Structures are given as C-alpha cells and as structure tokens.
Image (tube, helix red, strand yellow):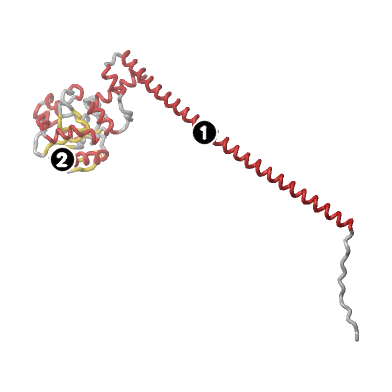
C-alpha cells in the first residue's frame, strides 16, 4: 500500500519577547485613543460654548441696536415736531411783523400742501386772461362739452345729486374764445357794456374756456338768476360740491374780488383738497391763491 503525502500546516511559535512587545503596543494605542477622545470632547464642548456666547452677544447687539434705533427715531420725531412747531411760530411772528391779521395768518398756516402749477388751479378772470389759442381736450356729457380732466368727478357729482331725487341740469360747460366773444357782443348790444360785464366775462376772461367750469341748474328753472339759491337742488349742490372737488366760483358778497356778480349756478373744479379748504373758509379762488403768495412773502 502506498502512503499519500498531504500538506502539513505548521504553526510558528510566538516568543515571549514578541508577546510583551504586542501588549505594550496595545496599551499605548489604547491610551492614545482615550486621550484623543478626551481632546475631541473638549474641542466640541468649547466650540458649543463659543457658539452660545456668539449667539448671546448677537442677541444683545440686536437688542441694543433696536433700542438705539428706537431712541434715534424718538429723537428724530421730537426734532421734526420741534422744527414744525418752530416753523409755525416763526411764520406767525413774521405774519405779525408784516401786519397780517391773525385770522388770515391762521389760514396761511393751515393751507393744504398742493402744487400750484397743476392744471386744477389755473386762475382765469378779467385780470388773468387766456388767448384764443387755449383749447382744452374735451368730452361730452349730456350734450355739453367739458374738460376730460373733470368728466368723472362731474358725472359722479350729478349722479349722486339725482340719487337724492334732485332735478339737476348741466346747462353749460366749455366755451371757446370765439363763442364767448359772440355772447359778449350780443349782451353788449342788448344790455349795454356796463351791465353785460356784470354777468358775462370778456373773451379770454371766462372760466368756461378752460373746460373746468360748469353751470348746474334745476330742470324746472329756465333762467339763471338768484332765485335758484332757493331750490333744494342748489342747496344740496352747495353743501356737497367740495366732496367732488368743486367750489361755488362766484359767491355772494365777493363780486369786487371775482369781478363777476353772484352766480349760484356756476361751479368750478379745483380738486378735493383745495375745494374743501375754500368752501370751509368761505373763500374765492382768488383769495385762496393769494394766501400762497402771502405765505411766500412771509417765508421769504
């Protein structure tokens, strides 16, 4: 019988010196890992504490900033208020020095802040005339031409009056220079120049040429005269016109200022802010604009 030879595995025997060296290596490695873990722990903890301190500092800074802003706002507000008060006192003092009556000085201080160069405040009378080239853009409302600028306001004004059961009639609006010229010639021929000028403006001196004025009457009153003021229609129109930006342009008792007799049918658009001030204080457009001239003189 033949014997088979197989592979024999032989284990190498570890010496005692190698075993001791391995133990020392493991011990050193363990100590190193523990030390590293401790170091990482403290680094993480320090970083966390640092972040907490930063957040606290940020919150503190934000609080101080808000507080500082509040203080600055209050200071600025106080300064602004003081400046306004001081300005009003200075204006009042200058008005007194200029011998302006206290009542008028009070009106000057209360004037609305508006742009006098805007189209709403154009002044047209015998002292401030337009030429024949002034032609506004117009739009028709109930067979009457008016400036497109006031179409919406006038429409609402009339509709709201009618909603109250009032019989409002838009009897006149835009008139060209040529039409005004013809009307004046007719009136002068019929009544004479002196009488004609009391109720009709010269060509170029009529507000109707701007398209910003309209004659509002009662359907049942054929003629335009002072009796219109007794109608419910006129009373409502006068009481509410400023809410739509209109004023009674030629009030009673102001004929020497406007140059036109009292007309309880002639309404002029000037914008809500100006209209409310004018109607509330019983002014004409001339007086209203003059207040701004006086204000400039006082402040100048």
Q: Is residue 143 left or right of residue 8?
A: left
Find residue 195 and report its image quarter: top left
Front position in the image: 229 or 126: 229
Q: Is residue 11 left or right of residue 256?
A: right
Judging by the rendered image, the residue that carries numbered circle 2 is: 164
The Cα atoms of the two marked residues, 2 and 1, are separated by 59 Å
Mark 2 neighbour class, 10 Å CA radius: few under 14, some 14 to 19, many 20 or more: few
Q: Quadrant of the N terminus?
A: bottom right
Percent x, y for residue 23?
Answer: 83, 54
Percent x, y for residue 290?
Answer: 27, 23
Percent x, y for residue 78?
Answer: 42, 24
**In the image, residue 14 above or below residue 129:** below
Front position in the image: 116 or 41: 41
- Tag 2–tag 1 contact (CB < 8 Å): no
Callout 1 secondary element: helix
Percent x, y for residue 248?
Answer: 19, 30
Q: Quadrant of the C terminus?
A: top left
Residue 143 visible? The answer is yes
- For the residues carrying marks 2 and 1, which lies nearer the camera in this image? 1
Callout 2 secondary element: loop
Q: Which mark is residue 63?
A: 1
Mark 1 neighbour class, 10 Å CA radius: few under 14, some 14 to 19, many 20 or more: few
Q: Residue at x 78, y 51 (%)?
A: 29
């Amino acid at each position: 019988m033949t014997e088979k030879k197989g592979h024999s595995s032989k284990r190498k025997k570890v010496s005692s010196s190698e075993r001791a060296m391995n133990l020392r290596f493991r011990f050193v490695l363990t100590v190193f890992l523990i030390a590293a873990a401790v170091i990482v722990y403290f680094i993480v903890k320090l970083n966390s504490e640092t972040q907490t301190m930063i957040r606290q500092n940020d919150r503190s800074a934000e609080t101080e900033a808000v507080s500082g802003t509040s203080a600055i706002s209050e200071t600025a507000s106080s300064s602004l208020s003081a400046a306004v008060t001081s300005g009003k006192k200075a204006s009042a003092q200058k008005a007194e020095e200029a011998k302006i009556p206290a009542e008028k000085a009070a009106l000057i201080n209360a004037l609305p802040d508006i742009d006098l160069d805007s189209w709403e405040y154009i002044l047209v009378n015998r002292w401030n005339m337009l030429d024949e080239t002034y032609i506004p853009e117009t739009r028709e409302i109930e067979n009457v031409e008016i400036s497109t600028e006031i179409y919406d306001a006038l429409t609402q004004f009339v509709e709201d009056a009618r909603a109250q059961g009032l019989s409002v009639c838009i009897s006149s609006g835009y008139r060209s220079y040529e039409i005004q010229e013809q009307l004046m010639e007719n009136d002068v021929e019929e009544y004479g120049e002196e009488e004609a000028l009391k109720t009709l403006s010269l060509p170029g001196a009529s507000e109707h040429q701007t398209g910003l004025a309209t004659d509002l009457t009662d359907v049942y009153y054929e003629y335009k005269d002072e009796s219109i003021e007794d109608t419910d229609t006129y009373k409502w129109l006068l009481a509410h016109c400023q809410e739509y930006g209109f004023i009674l342009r030629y009030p009673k008792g102001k004929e020497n200022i406007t140059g036109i007799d009292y007309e309880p049918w002639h309404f002029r658009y000037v914008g809500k802010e100006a209209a409310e001030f004018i109607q509330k204080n019983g002014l004409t457009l001339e007086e209203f604009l003059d207040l701004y001239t006086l204000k400039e003189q006082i402040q100048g």
